[in-house]
Image (cartoon, rainbow, N blue to C red):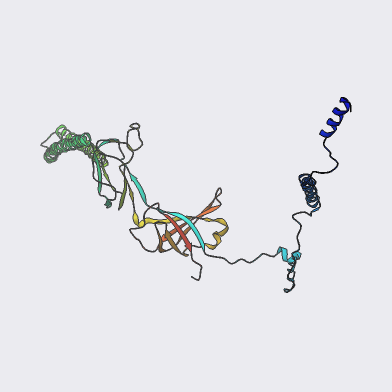
């Protein structure tokens, strides 16, 4: 054998025979598994594509031991006459919300411009009608009043002097009249005496008018002095104190931004009531004198009996409500202004 043949035999011995699988190994299972997965995914996709709409009803199988449920009856459709008939609804108790208000409340101020020299009230204090609340500086007004009184005294003294002169002139006239009747006195003396009496009588009338003017001035200055003493217009409770000693007070803030316009705020606690807004759709269920139960938010378990005072004859366009005034049957110190309240309207037979 030649060398070339030896090399060819050697190369053939190194080739791999692929006609038979190696011992212990079979076909590729990975390829088989991959093909199976692809086939399964295709089947699922076809199933989802062919599935019915999710919103469609699905029949549920009933067990053989249980009978099938009876179909729900279809509600009858109302005819035209029934569709137009109103549906009766039971009416419950009408409840409305509101607040406690005072029908009689005032912020007490001065009628004149002045400086406060004394404040005699505090918050929560009870006051009576006419009680002094504060005093303003009255030094100038007191002097003017004294001057007016002095003028009255001066005029009165002048009147007394003229009255004395008039009485003397009348006596002289009477004497001259007697002498003239006996032709002892002259006509000129009689005329002079009569003129004197007439002049003094006119002077008396002038003095009387001047005296009346002086007395009116006294009354005017007395009124101005009284206005410097601020009093309570009615009995109540002081809820706000708005001024202090030394501040300037003015009825219309004419003294500038630092001038006070009120001394205090007084509330008549006997005038407290509740104002509620009732929807206009239910106002027909509210009548004057109707009994109600009031519940304050501060005392939710306390039912206060009351009644309707009045239905205010006007409606609120924006809220579609009507204001109703509610009065308390009895007073209680726990009821305060601006408290939130709920009112339950009783039925007519309740």
Residue 345 in the image: x percent, y percent? Answer: 49, 63
Residue drawn at point x = 76 percent, y = 66 percent: 79
Tell me which corner region of the image, top left, top right, bottom left or bottom right, holds residue 244.
top left
Q: Quadrant of the N terminus?
A: top right
Q: Nearer the viewer, residue 73 or 299?
A: 73
Tell me which corner region of the image, top left, top right, bottom left or bottom right, holds residue 118.
top left
Residue 277 in the image: x percent, y percent? Answer: 50, 54
Left or right for 294, reference 174: right
Q: Which of 112 and 193 is in front in this view?
A: 112
Q: Which of 66 and 132 is in front in this view?
A: 66
Residue 198 in the image: x percent, y percent? Answer: 20, 36
Kindly tell me whether residue 197 is visible in this rendering: no
Kindly tell me whether residue 53 is visible in this rendering: yes
Tell me which corner region of the image, top left, top right, bottom left or bottom right, holds residue 88.
bottom right
Left or right for 317, reference 5: left
Q: Nearer the viewer, residue 333 or 158?
A: 333
- Count numbered badges in the picture: 0
Left or right for 255, reference 32: left
Residue 15 in the image: x percent, y percent? Answer: 83, 34
Farthest residue in the front direction? 1
Residue 322 against residue 185 in the figure, above or below: below
Residue drawn at point x = 72 percent, y = 63 percent: 83
Residue drawn at point x = 34 percent, y = 60 percent: 332
């Amino acid at each position: 054998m030649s060398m070339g043949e030896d090399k060819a035999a050697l190369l053939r011995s190194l080739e791999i025979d692929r006609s038979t699988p190696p011992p212990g190994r079979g076909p590729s299972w990975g390829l088989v598994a991959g093909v199976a997965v692809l086939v399964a995914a295709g089947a699922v996709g076809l199933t989802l594509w062919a599935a019915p709409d999710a919103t469609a009803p699905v029949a549920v199988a009933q067990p053989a031991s249980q009978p099938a449920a009876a179909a729900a009856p279809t509600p009858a459709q109302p005819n035209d006459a029934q569709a137009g008939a109103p549906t009766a609804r039971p009416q419950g108790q009408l409840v409305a919300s509101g607040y406690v208000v005072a029908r009689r409340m005032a912020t007490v101020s001065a009628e004149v411009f002045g400086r406060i020299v004394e404040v005699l009230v505090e918050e929560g204090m009870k006051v009576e009608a006419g009680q002094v609340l504060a005093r303003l500086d009255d030094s100038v007004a007191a002097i003017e009043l004294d001057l007016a009184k002095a003028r009255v005294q001066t005029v009165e003294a002048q009147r007394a002097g003229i009255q004395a002169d008039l009485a003397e002139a009348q006596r002289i006239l009477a004497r001259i009249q007697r002498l003239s009747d006996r032709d002892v006195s002259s006509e000129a003396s009689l005329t002079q005496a009569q003129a004197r009496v007439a002049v003094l009588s006119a002077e008396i009338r002038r003095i009387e008018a001047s005296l009346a003017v002086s007395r009116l001035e006294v009354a005017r200055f007395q009124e101005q002095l009284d206005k410097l003493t601020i009093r309570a217009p009615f009995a109540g409770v002081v809820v706000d104190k708005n001024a202090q000693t030394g501040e300037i007070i003015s009825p219309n803030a004419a003294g500038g931004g630092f001038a006070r316009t009120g001394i205090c705020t007084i509330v008549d606690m006997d005038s407290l009531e509740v104002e509620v807004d009732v929807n206009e759709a239910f106002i027909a269920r509210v009548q004057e004198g109707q009994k109600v139960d009031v519940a304050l938010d501060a005392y939710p378990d306390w039912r206060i009996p009351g009644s309707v005072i009045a239905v205010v004859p006007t409606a609120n366009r924006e809220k579609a409500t009507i204001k109703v005034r509610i009065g308390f049957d009895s007073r209680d110190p726990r009821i305060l202004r601006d408290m939130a309240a709920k009112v339950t309207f009783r039925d007519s037979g309740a």
